[in-house]
Amino acid sequence: MIRPLPPALDRAEALRYLGGAGKEVPPAVDALLDKAAAELWRTAAPRAAVRRVSADKLAPLLAGRDIAAHLKGCDEGLLLAVTLGAGVDSALRRAMATDMAYGVVLDAAASTLVEQLANDLENEQRALLESEGRYLTGRFSPGYGDWPITVQPAFVQWLDAGRQAGICSTASCVLTPGKSITALCGAADHPVKGKLAGCATCALRETCTKRKEGKPCAQ
């Protein structure tokens, strides 16, 4: 499934990835963000995959308390995946090899852009389900809380993400292309919010910029 790019890069979010949220942006960083955005819009080829699955069939993908709590009260799961494509991976490798400062900014911009695409896809699916009188939780990705990242290969296979979006998982559970996101939402015929995982068991604890800013997801 081919996806459109958003109107513009969320620069404030990109700056958060760079650790500059709420700070004055140096002109040099601003210029690098402009360059990164232009390169992403030139090299990205966004694609996505979506699959709705009844809750009673999700058991092989579920492990841990957090994902179970997130899906409590849901009778259906919505598997999602989005990617910027292999062209962005190539651009990142070139940037890291030739200009480290630019490479870091491009990486932050790419992370921001794939999150924007995931948000757009989630909102689109939420509107679709609402038209059916159904409700959707937020996204919950493998590696969040105590849901192990080791489910990633099975998740990708269940979603048929390779055929639909060109997304694969390595044996070590790394997604390729690198700037890709997989996630699971719960759906129900009554309002559901799901449960955000806490920091204590999260696989992203050490690199999470929100936690370092004192604004964890669970707040």
Image: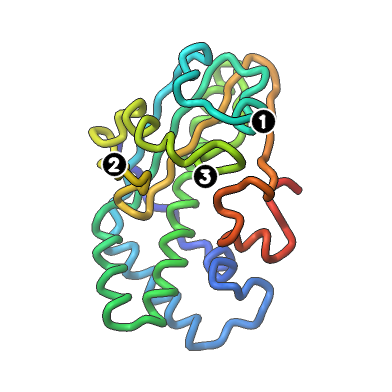
Near mark 2 (Cα within 10 A), the count class, few <14, some 14-19 or many ≥20, is many
Q: Which residue is mark 3?
A: 119
Residue type at numbered disc 3: Asn
CA distance for labels 2 and 3: 21 Å
Q: In the figure, is residue 76 to the left or right of 151?
A: right
Q: Which residue is mark 1?
A: 194
Q: In the figure, is residue 113 to the left or right of 71?
A: left
Q: In the figure, is residue 35 to the left or right of 86?
A: right
- Which element type, helix, strand or loop, lies under badge 3? helix
- Which element type, helix, strand or loop, lies under badge 1? loop
Q: Nearer the viewer, residue 206 or 129?
A: 206
Near mark 3 (Cα within 10 A), the count class, few <14, some 14-19 or many ≥20, is some
Which one is in front in this view, the residue at disc 2 or the one at disc 1? 2
Residue 79 pos. (x, y %): 45, 29
Give the quadrant of the N terminus.
top left
Residue type at numbered disc 2: Cys
Q: Which residue is mark 2?
A: 168
Numbered-mark total: 3
Relative to 51, does residue 106 appear above or below in the rendering? Answer: below
Residue 205 pos. (x, y %): 61, 55
Near mark 1 (Cα within 10 A), the count class, few <14, some 14-19 or many ≥20, is many
